[in-house]
């Protein structure tokens, strides 16, 4: 197995953290550990702004962490912009979604509408030939990725790799979902997008994680950690172990290791801090354990998965379906 395509950057920091004034020091420690040439660099900070929910709902990267990152980067001379392309419940209302989850106010004039300047970008993929991607992603000198540790009904866990799906603008996400419908297909599609421009630094909000049927309607679980690494796959591998699960449970991270996109064998990763796995972290109901899970998730998913279709003339835009979907 070779990791020549992308440096392994196989040290991961695990720091105790809380959503309070101490977050600034946590972020400063991370930036000191992983120094980059920030001065004058166009730096895109990419949080998870999935939906317009209060930050206490745990569905988005917490604004206190985002604010600390922006402040610390600016103090190092970076030219900072902050943005994301929210999911379906935030489609077309990017600023409002960011306001509701607290990030708009937290970063003030650094926020941009990442959906405002889409460009067509050719991709080598089994499922699509191109994606509509935010121009700012392609133009950035440095990308700082701020994922939230959550479960996900289709990818099991959403972390650093999955957060780069937010590079894709608006409704084009739905096109990709419709063309890569099974867990394996979507895992491969995520990696096709991730490879367009892997982040330079990943800082995961695991202070309060989400278990169960995430990424927006799961159950909150306090872990009290921030996890950081230059390599997204390596960070995700450690995060999976932190919640007491194995790489084989999360296909897109397993595939990332096989493709040489990062070191995912935790025994080969240098841990700065303490990796103390928690017990009983609940995965989505779409990911059963044991032999039954293998059969359901890998062999029958293409037969039992369905893609919702909106009956336009009957839709009242009540968003009940959105709120109840994992």
Image: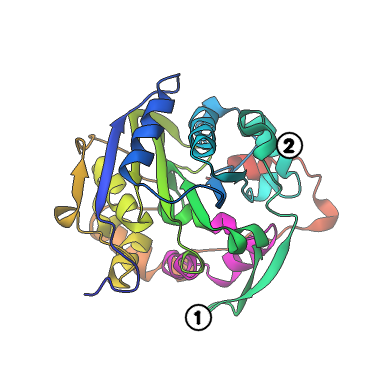
Label 2 or label 1, whichever lies nearer to me, is: 2
Within 10 Å of disc 2 (Cα), the crowding (few <14, some 14-19, many 20+) is some
In the rendering, at what x and y percent does residue 129 appear?
A: 60, 80
In the rendering, at what x and y percent does residue 228 appear?
A: 34, 43
Disc 1 marks which residue? 126
The magenta region covers 165-192
Disc 2 marks which residue? 96
Would you place residue 48 above or below residue 278 in this image? below
Q: Is 82 on the left-hand or right-hand side of 144?
A: right
Q: Which mark is residue 227?
A: none
Quarter occupied by residue 106: top right
Residue depicted at x 43% and y 27%: 24
Residue depicted at x 53% and y 25%: 56
Considering the numbered disc 1 on the image, is that residue within a helix, a strand or a loop? loop
Q: How many marks?
A: 2
Return the disc, 2 or 1, that comes first in the chain's sequence: 2
Whether residue 53 is visible here, answered yes or no, is: no
Q: Is 143 on the left-hand or right-hand side of 15?
A: right
Q: CA distance from mark 2 to mark 1?
A: 35 Å
Quarter occupied by residue 128: bottom right
């Amino acid at each position: 197995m070779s990791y020549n395509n992308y440096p392994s950057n196989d040290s991961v920091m695990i720091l105790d953290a809380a959503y309070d004034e101490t977050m600034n020091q946590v972020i400063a420690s991370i930036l000191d550990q992983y120094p980059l040439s920030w001065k004058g660099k166009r730096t895109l900070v990419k949080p998870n702004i999935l939906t317009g929910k209060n930050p206490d709902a745990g569905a988005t990267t917490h604004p206190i962490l985002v604010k600390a990152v922006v402040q610390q980067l600016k103090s190092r001379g970076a030219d900072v912009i902050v943005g994301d392309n929210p999911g379906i419940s935030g489609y077309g209302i990017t600023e409002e979604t960011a306001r509701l989850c607290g990030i708009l106010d937290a970063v003030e004039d650094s926020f941009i509408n990442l959906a405002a300047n889409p460009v067509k970008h050719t991709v080598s993929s089994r499922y699509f030939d191109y994606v509509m991607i935010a121009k700012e992603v392609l133009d950035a000198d440095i990308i700082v990725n701020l994922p939230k540790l959550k479960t996900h009904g289709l990818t099991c866990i959403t972390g650093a790799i999955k957060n780069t799906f937010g590079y894709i603008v608006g409704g084009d996400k739905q096109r990709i979902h419709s063309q890569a419908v099974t867990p394996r297909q979507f895992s491969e599609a995520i990696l096709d997008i991730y490879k367009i421009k892997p982040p330079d630094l990943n800082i995961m909000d695991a202070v309060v994680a989400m278990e169960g049927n995430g990424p927006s309607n799961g159950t909150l679980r306090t872990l009290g950690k921030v996890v950081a690494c230059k390599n997204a796959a390596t960070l995700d591998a450690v995060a999976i172990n932190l919640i007491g699960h194995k790489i084989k449970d999360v296909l897109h991270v397993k595939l990332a290791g096989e493709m040489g996109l990062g070191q995912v064998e935790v025994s080969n990763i240098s841990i700065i801090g303490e990796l103390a796995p928690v017990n009983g972290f609940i995965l989505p109901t779409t990911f059963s354990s044991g032999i039954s899970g293998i059969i359901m998730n890998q062999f029958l998913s293409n037969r039992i998965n369905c893609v919702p279709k909106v009956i336009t003339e009957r839709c009242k835009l009540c968003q009940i379906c959105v709120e109840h979907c994992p």
